[in-house]
Amino acid sequence: EGLQVALRVIRQQRGNSLMELQSIWSISCCQTSETEVEEFYTNLETEDLSVTGMSSGPEAGPSSSGKTVTQTTDVGWINQMLEHLYPEFEQVATFMLENDIMPRVKAQVLAKSEKVKDIKFSKFRLGSVPPNMDKIQVTNLPGGVCKVRCWGEYRSDMSVLMTVSTTLGEFHCGFKNLSVVGDFVVIVNPYEEANPGTASMSFYFADKPEIDFDFAGQVAFINSLGIKDIFIKLAMTALEKKVILPNMATINVAMLERKVYPMVFEQPDPMGMLRVTYIKGGLIKQKKALSFNRVFENAFEFVDNKLGKMMGKDMSEYLQIILGETKWEPNLNANNLSATFVVVDPQQRLHMHVWDRDLMGADDLMASSGPHHLDVLQKRFSGKPVVFQDEDGEPYASCQFQFEWMNLERGMVGEQDSMVILAVRELYVHTHLERTRKFGLRGKILDMVRTSHMGAILKHRHENPVVKHHMEAVQACLHENKVDSAIVEKVMSLVPDHTRISINSSIHFVVPTAELDHCTLELSIVEFTKKDKTFEETIVGQTTVKMTDLRAAKDMNMPDAIKFTGAVADIEGEIDLTLCGLLPGAPPAYDVEKGAPRMSVHHSIHDPTDDIMPR
């Protein structure tokens, strides 16, 4: 029923043929005959398509980009799709919870309190309740792509039991009622041009969602350890690395075989760049009634600042400007400093904060402004200060900024600046590597150094449960036939002759166009080895690319594999290099849709029985 609602909406907006609707029907993997689809299509021909439960008036109509935008509260079809895909999401989230978030929670609590001796987690279960959407906005994009912006809430029936061993005894509690509130985007592409016969669904948060949960059990002592704040902070960090722009997750589906490929985490190509120049700023003198707490806070700040200055530390307030993964922190008393922020979606927003630097304890968030949509920055703050307000809504600081938007144009260079985009999908190493090893790709142009996310070594087909089951049967058969144990052991010791490292990350360099003919991109494969609380870095492969060669390439793009030489083995990188021009212009309107964000490197569609993503 939910699918039929979706098809009515699609039919109303696009007038699809029977064949197209049958293809869309196939994506849902419904066990439905072609005859039923034909009957439904015939009924559609005679229906009054203006009656679909869609809202009208100011909430429906063309966006500023001219694309058809429809907003609706008839969300049964999207909720049904999320319900079918939820088991895949639940596996990924549970893996992140068990292997990333909870070990970090344990480490931070143990470091924070001497009274805590150990923390044990048990009965991990994210829950079986899928996200539920309240309202959606659907935008038709070129090539049959559908962009669905969803407003809703994820209320999980999560179950996590925790035992805290302390000098005072054991305390037991549980995590429950995990809530994630926000709006996220789902992009449905019924036809991947690079992989005919393949459809895809990508999803991401354009901005940070709100995360909360409840404790059950011996709550008072657990709250005193600050576990809730630690958990929420680490959970947000994990989300930022995976599904908050510029990061996104994609699931590919083979249409004919109805096969779902492993989830891929990736970063889309940029659409432009925002240059922020901090001109000057300062604090606004506040007139607030004194209280005991305020007097104590002021006295503590005075002592903390004096101690910091005596130790030669800079204790001045600082700004924190955030867009996507880029964070810039100039001092509040600085002036005429600039930073650049890469933008991948017009719905991203700029976050601005003022922080107080503390010697003892964590820095304090003092005031904020925004978050601001990109299309209003130049208009709202042209010649006007940005006023930061504290938690009481009182003015705290006033700062002058200049905001410049640069459009990204492919196949050309900019008059003043250009951007080099390095999109890396994976590394192919011609030898076997242990899955515990961590690698990343590093690039250097002039004095700029950028490093990708750390990659994950993919499982080999030998680790597939089906393959393992058959190999156990082979082993049993060999033993039954009295084959020598040493031979059986040798046969069963399967070691892959190659390793695939999934990175799915992009790094960008803004280079003065005048310098392009005189500089070289230095690429290095870096291995990260954890030592105590830090990582040691080892270069295991290197190569170089001249910018003159990239500029001379067709469309200023090098999509071919790049070979590295190094001590480990021969390594090939599935890397896409692109040179683009940066041209001054106006930032895109918040509702502009310029197409689905995708990586330059095409998705590596492979059989799930080959190499499998570990997440």
Image: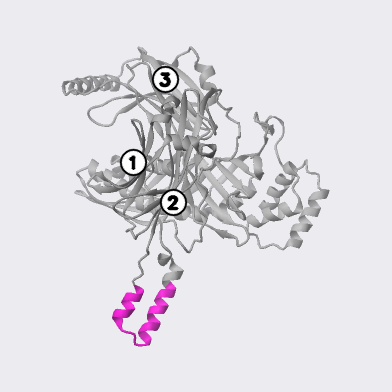
Label 1: how many residues lie within 10 Å, few (<14), some (14-19) or many (20+)?
some
- The three-letter code of the residue at mark 3 reads Thr
Side of 224 relative to 190 (left or right)? left
Q: Nearer the observer, disc 2 or disc 1?
A: 2
Q: Earlier in the sequence, mark 1 or mark 3?
A: 1
Look at mark 2 in the image and give the residue it sits on.
93
Expressed as whole percent of the image width and height from the top left, the position of residue 454 reads 36, 46
* Residue bearing mark 1: 230
Secondary structure of the residue carrying numbered label 3: strand
Q: Amino acid at mark 1?
A: Ile
Where is residue 456 drawn, in percent x and y? Answer: 38, 52
Q: Which residue carries the number 3 mark?
A: 277
| Along the line of sight, the residue nearer the viewer: 589 or 340 | 340
Q: Give the CA distance from mark 2 to mark 1.
A: 18 Å
Percent position (x, y) of residue 397? 38, 16
Task: Report the span colored magenta.
Answer: 469-492
N-term mark: 2 or 3: 2
Q: Is residue 287 placed above or below 438 in the rendered structure?
A: above
Q: Quadrant of residue 487?
A: bottom left
Q: Is residue 426 left or right of residue 220?
A: right
Q: Whole-Å distance between the Cαs marked 2 and 3?
A: 38 Å
* Residue toward you, 181 or 43: 43
Near mark 2 (Cα within 10 A), the count class, few <14, some 14-19 or many ≥20, is some
Q: Is residue 190 above or below residue 607?
A: above
Mark whose residue sits in front, 1 or 3: 3
Dot placed on the residue nearer the N-terminal end, 2 or 1 = 2
